[in-house]
Image (cartoon, helix red, strand yellow):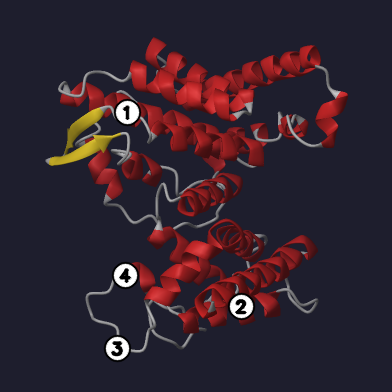
Amino acid sequence: MERDAQADAKVRAERSSEPNGESATKDNARSTTQLQIAHIAKIETHGPASKEVDSETLAAKLATLELEIQEKILRRYDLDGKDITPEHITVLQVFVRGIAGITPEAAKEAARQLNVLCPPLNQTGWANNWIYMVWLIMLDIVVDIGSIDTVQECCVRILEELVQCAKGMMDVWGSKLRVWRDLPVFPTAFHEFWENDVQSWKNINCFAARLMRSGLASDYDQAITALRIALEEDMNTLPGFADCRTQVACLWIKHASKFLLRWALESPGLAEVAGTSPSYLEAGPLYGGPATMCLQRWGFWIERLEMLGKEASVLEEDTREMALQAARTIRNVEKRVRRLLSA
């Protein structure tokens, strides 16, 4: 991570970021460690179960969770041969405490500490690299432990608090961006995580969908790519590929369906699509409508999801259920929006 974020990282941002859902041999260590702290999903501070846990027990569990997350990420850094500096440790600890706290107050405190730790913005190179490091550490957590909803939601909450901190303006590749409102160099850091093993790819897509839902970021290209390869193309016959791609598409719908529908309503798709349309809007071979985000495409996704959810589908049972639930989610969102428009 010791690099020039304004040069080296910019090159990465320009690469093709087609997700593949493949299992990478080099990531075997990451994949196997993702299950080791799955029990932390049971630690909640709300709901009926919380009444059965006294404050002392909860504090002990949260302290254990904090230690486990930190050790897991550091172990993975060691396996990957990454250089770990005191700055890395400090930032990692801030995120871990914000996540382990599982409360709005913990997220707010994590954001406050990150804002205080940020170098002076007039020292452009240092500030750019430091902020880039912050994003990489957060995304490492999301990718490795993000299959647990609590972890992802806490990271979103920290970002929501962070963008409320007005640090000032910073030069990024010749453009003046607000720190933290514009999340400078965040998209560049995000692109480093798209091509990974199956579980990591699911985690990063799920996190991107949550960010779209919250209004923090809008990864149009990754949303359309995920939905296209799952719903507009013939199923990949390699073991697990069709299930992986379908599940990722369902995660986008689960977390960002309202945003996607608003996008479709803003683009009726009645006119011929201009030749300058973004390439990520390219239509798959099974979809015969306009290569744009429109209601026709939205309707095709519903039909396709319902078809994939049938018992005759080659998908696993849990994936079929996810497809049917995604179709129901889309229809429910449609109904609510139509009621609002007709009111």
Q: Are marks 3 and 4 in contact (CB under 8 Å)?
A: no
Q: Position of residue 158 (x, y in %)?
A: 49, 32
Does the rendering let one see residue 275? yes
State the SS at label 2. helix
Point out the tag, 1 or 4, that comes first from the N-terminus. Answer: 1
In the image: residue 126, left or right of residue 296: left
What residue is pinned by disc 4?
Answer: 279
The residue positioned 63% from the left and 66% from the top of the image is 242
Quick one: quadrant of the C terminus? bottom right
Q: Check disc 3 and report the residue beneath it.
A: 272
Q: CA distance from mark 1 to mark 2?
A: 40 Å
Kindly state the secondary structure of the residue where label 1 is placed: helix
Label 4: state its secondary structure.
helix
> Which of labels 3 and 4 is toward the front?
3
Three-letter amino acid code of the residue under disc 4: Ser
* Residue designated by label 1: 131
Q: Earlier in the sequence, mark 1 or mark 2?
A: 1
Please state if 53 lies on the left or on the right of 159 as rendered: right
Identify which amino acid the numbered label 3 is placed on: Glu
Q: At 55% from the left edge and 54% from the top edge, which residue is drawn? A: 22
- The residue furthest left is 174
Q: To which residue does mark 2 refer?
A: 302
Report helix, strand or loop for mark 3: loop
Mark with earlier residue (3, 4): 3
